[in-house]
Amino acid sequence: MVRDLFGVELPVIQAPMAGAQLGAMAIAVSEAGGLGSLPCAMLNAEGIRKELAALKAATSKPYNVNFFCHAPPSPDEKRESAWREKLGPYYREFGIDPASIPVGPGRAPFDAAAAEVLEEFRPPVVSFHFGLPSRDLLVRVKKLGAKVIASATTVDEALWLEAHGADAIIAQGAEAGGHRSLFLTDDLTTQVGTFALLPQVVRAVKVPVIAAGGIADARGVAAALSLGAIAAQVGTAYLLCSEAMTSTVHRAALKSEAARHTALTNLFTGRPARGIINRVMRELGPLNPSAPAFPLATGAIAPLRAKAEAKGSGDFSPLWSGQNATGCRETGAAALTRHLAGV
Ligand SMILES: Cc1cc2nc3c(=O)[nH]c(=O)nc-3n(C[C@H](O)[C@H](O)[C@H](O)COP(=O)(O)O)c2cc1C
């Protein structure tokens, strides 16, 4: 039961969505009885501290703090410059000098500085994407009494997470918006839909399982529960909420016919993630083997995104969305949470 594990009333976890929301959404969801999440992949220690202080001041309900835990790649000069050459025609189109673009990681993995912040706040739930952090960091999190949850995209990953200390597994089906959490393989043929993955994971592991991917209404949540999940983790449906920081072009795409066409792409960060198909995905991808390793691809496309967005275009933006954007509602996150829970 979700109440036993997390102390929340409703079987709805608002998916952490780095870049699309911060603590305000987490507060609204937790106050409504679901489990709100604070994504930290794009925050430094000071940013995490600030958000957690505001969160703790605003709610005494349980909440989740989320981190990526990829191994940072060593920058590869040759690959970077080959990729910038591929983007060259676009840089010229927008009058961007490729030499002026800083090489930056874009997203940081969980580290000792972040663990220190968690020690100050002792969050009740901590979730991880792309596996789990190193043993010593995980022990630090567990010592705080936090429930540790992590996303699996295959049965093998679910078994790995259970064996390495996860208290619950998020079964992330291929429909899901944003980054695929796959971490034991790069083979995308292993990625299956939520209702294919969920019962297999439920059968394979002893810990509770949470369903994610394509769940966008109360019937979807109920279906996930009837297949053995204790809760549904919902992302895309929250992207039009008033608390979301979703950009104007992203909101427009989610509300348009374009949202019916999504694909996995590595062009924006270097790792496969599901988003609405746009110009750069059509022309260079959606998957391109030359893109720099995650998260280094972020830097090269950033100025194109900025220039295009300034003109009202999402041609170079990561328009993250799951396959089911029909649950997106322009409402508050609390109302959406109750709607998803059918209360
Ligand atoms: C805009 C966006 C950003 C995301 N960012 C994160 C993140 O920072 N951390 C994470 O664990 N999952 C992230 N995800 C994936 C979600 O945890 C979840 O798997 C997914 O949203 C569920 O599928 P749905 O979008 O169809 O509801 C993101 C998803 C979206 C749509």
Image (tube, rainbow, N blue to C red):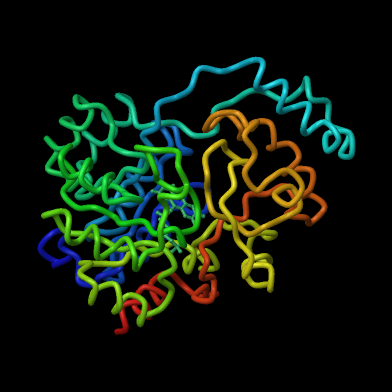
Query: Height in image: 96 above or below 274?
Result: above
Query: Height in image: 28 above or below 137?
Result: below
Q: Quadrant of the C terminus?
A: bottom left
Is residue 143 left or right of 97 when viewed as pictured? left
Residue located at (45% from left, 48% from top):
180
Position of residue 81 measured from the top left corner of the image (x, y, whole percent):
72, 20
Q: Where is ligand 1, by quadrant?
A: bottom left
Query: Height in image: 315 above or below 341?
Result: above
Is residue 214 left or right of 230 when viewed as pictured? right
* Quadrant in the picture for residue 11: bottom left
Position of residue 252 measured from the top left corner of the image (x, y, whole percent):
68, 66
Residue located at (51% from left, 70% from top):
324
Position of residue 40 measured from the top left corner of the image (x, y, whole percent):
41, 41
* Quadrant in the picture for residue 262: bottom right
Q: How many marks?
A: 0
Residue located at (40% from left, 77% from top):
335
Q: Quadrant of the N terminus?
A: bottom left
297 vs 288, nearest the viewer? 288
Position of residue 135 measured from the top left corner of the image (x, y, whole percent):
20, 27
Is residue 289 left or right of 165 when viewed as pictured? right
Residue at the front extreme? 189
